[in-house]
Image: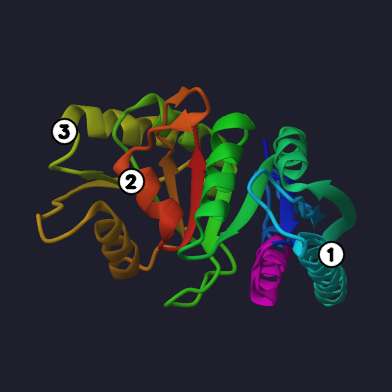
Amino acid sequence: MAVRDLFFPLVSYPRPPAKAAIEHVLDLGQNLSRGESEKGSAIRVRISALIYEIEVETGLYFEGASIGTFVDEQNRKSAACAQTLLKQFEESAAHHDVMHRCRLEHRTMYGAITHMIEAARLHHMTVRPQPRGDDNQQNLTERLIFESGRPALIFPETSVRPLATSFASIAVAWDGSRPATRAVADAMPFLRRAKSVRAFTATDDKPLSSEQAQQFIDFLADHGVSAVHEDVKKTEDHSIGSFMESYVASRGIDLLVMGAYGHSRLREFILGGATQSVLVNPPCWTFLSH
């Protein structure tokens, strides 16, 4: 099934995403719409933007007579940022040939998170910019990945190298696990349309036999995807994050597909090293599924 409806949540507080992030998503949606399906007809992609104007609450530990003034100031800031996001999206969308819709929700932060997860379940995929050093945004993306039942497409809000506007070259981090299998199945619309697909396995992590690797390549071929597999040595000089970044950069990868590893217990996630690394610093467009 083609990916058609991309959920794009934008949060006004404490810091709204950069305007460039909106442009990246609209550029991608426009170029995906220009692609062709297996039957030769264009796939129309819709960007469904949902802007959350966050209502700032006092919280348990706020004290002092000036707290009311502080909260009022922060709510005015949140409202102004929400209106700016709305204007930026509408103005940028008007210059892109892509279907889109946008609406504004007024929620507390807790209410926004709950609403966002519920909304994500009703779209094909969620798209999220990831700012470096922002634990709140990282935690929100984790919850969307593990609780929505839908894949997430994340990308660096600021990137060292230019982000691709289409997915011609795709890399699949493959170890034969359940999350990796789910990610491949969810990403199949992208894989079928790519010009180049590489499956790679870190040889010091969960090595595959040559037979297992060939079985995966044959599986992809049966689904219309021509791919190659390679074992890649991750040396002690590389963290898993720098290893991923180096692999993507050296092979000109537009999209990285990988399973998201996590365990849910009392709302706490114990993330695998690779998942944690790409959430902190995605090396390119990164497709995560759990």
**Could you tell me if the residues under marks 1 and 2 are in contact, i.e. CB atoms within 8 Å?**
no
Q: Does 44 sit above or below residue 117?
A: below
Q: Secondary structure at mark 2?
A: helix
Q: Quadrant of residue 177?
A: top left
**Could you tell me if the residues under marks 1 and 3 are in contact, i.e. CB atoms within 8 Å?**
no
Front label number (1 vs 3): 1
Q: Which residue is mark 3?
A: 210
| Disc 3 packing (10 Å; few <14; some 14–19; many ≥20) | few
Query: x%, y% of residue 200?
Result: 28, 46
Name which residue type carries label 3. Answer: Ser
Name which residue type carries label 2. Answer: Ala
**Magenta span:** 14-31
Q: Secondary structure at mark 1?
A: helix
**Could you tell me if the residues under marks 3 and 2 are in contact, i.e. CB atoms within 8 Å?**
no
Front label number (1 vs 2): 1
Q: Could you give the CA–CA distance between mark 1 and mark 3, rounded to whole angstroms?
A: 62 Å
Q: Does 184 sit above or below residue 215?
A: below
Q: Which residue is mark 2?
A: 274
| Disc 1 packing (10 Å; few <14; some 14–19; many ≥20) | some
The reply, left or right, for residue 67 in relation to residue 183 is: right
Query: x%, y% of residue 198?
Result: 34, 51
Q: Could you give the CA–CA distance between mark 3 and mark 2, rounded to whole angstroms?
A: 23 Å
Front label number (3 vs 2): 2
Taking the view exactly as shown, the residue that stands out farthest to the top is: 265
Q: Identify which residue is drawn at 77% across, 34% down.
A: 122
Which numbered marker is on residue 72? Answer: 1
| Upstream in sequence: badge 3 or badge 2 | 3
